[in-house]
Image: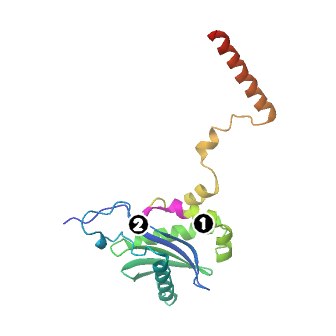
Amino acid sequence: MAPNLSLFSVNAILILATDDSSRVLTKYYDAPHPPTGNPSTYPGQIAYKTVKDQKAFEKGLLEKTAKQTSDIILYDNRICVFKTEGDLMLYVVGGAEENEILLYHVILALRDSLNILLKNSVDKRTVIENYDLVSLAVDELVDDGIILEIDPVVIASRVSRPPAQDMTSMQGIDLSERGLMNAWDFGKAKLAASLRNGL
């Protein structure tokens, strides 16, 4: 039987505080298209549907990784890759069959993009104050469990400034009062001309 091939790789991205074990940012993902058959055995199916189950998983994961010296562990039949940044723990959780190196690159991209966006000041207070940037960075990194980008510079540039193609179309437009008046006069002249030709 052929293995289930899917782009779905990440079950969860977690940012937890180490001082009080609180959630700072958590995103859990379900596989958008689980295979037919027995869905309970599919590794992309997340078992933590309720907040209570998620918090229990996070608490156990934080306790287990607090004593670890490595960056990759197998916890609750899931591969968990983690990094410590200040008073935060960053986690990327994947299925037991997932490629550890791929998940490790995701956690490195998350850590490095947060360092770029938050100017090397990644701690609980800064992340909460810049929650919008952090959430956008996670969304640029992973969408519905599918890894989109692992280059931290690209992620940070997409989050911190608007897309370039939108800005090029705005360069020739004069938005001053005079420019708006010119546009109004132009529109008025075109309307008058079309009304004259139509009558």
| Residue 76 percent across, percent down from the top left | 38, 82
Graded by Cα atoms within 10 Å as few (under 14), some (14 to 19) or many (20 or more), the crowding at tag 1 reads: many
Mark-to-mark CA distance, 1 and 2: 21 Å
Q: Earlier in the sequence, mark 1 or mark 2?
A: 2
- Report the residue that reaches farthest toward the right: 177
Q: Is residue 45 magenta?
A: no
Graded by Cα atoms within 10 Å as few (under 14), some (14 to 19) or many (20 or more), the crowding at tag 2 reads: some
For the residue pair 130 and 185, the one nearer the viewer reads as 185
For the residue pair 126 and 44, the one nearer the viewer reads as 44
Q: Is residue 142 magenta?
A: yes
Residue behind mark 1: 134
Q: Three-letter amino acid code at disc 2?
A: Asp
Q: Three-letter amino acid code at disc 1?
A: Val
Label placed on residue 30: 2
Check the image and report above or below for 135 versus 21.
above
Check the image and report above or below for 46 versus 140.
below
Choose top left, top right, bottom left or bottom right for residue 38: bottom left
Which residues are drawn in magenta?
138-146
For the residue pair 96 and 44, the one nearer the viewer reads as 44
Locate the C terminus and report the quarter of the image it occupies.
top right
- Report the residue that reaches farthest toward the bottom: 67
Check the image and report above or below for 174 versus 1.
above
Q: Is residue 120 visible?
A: no
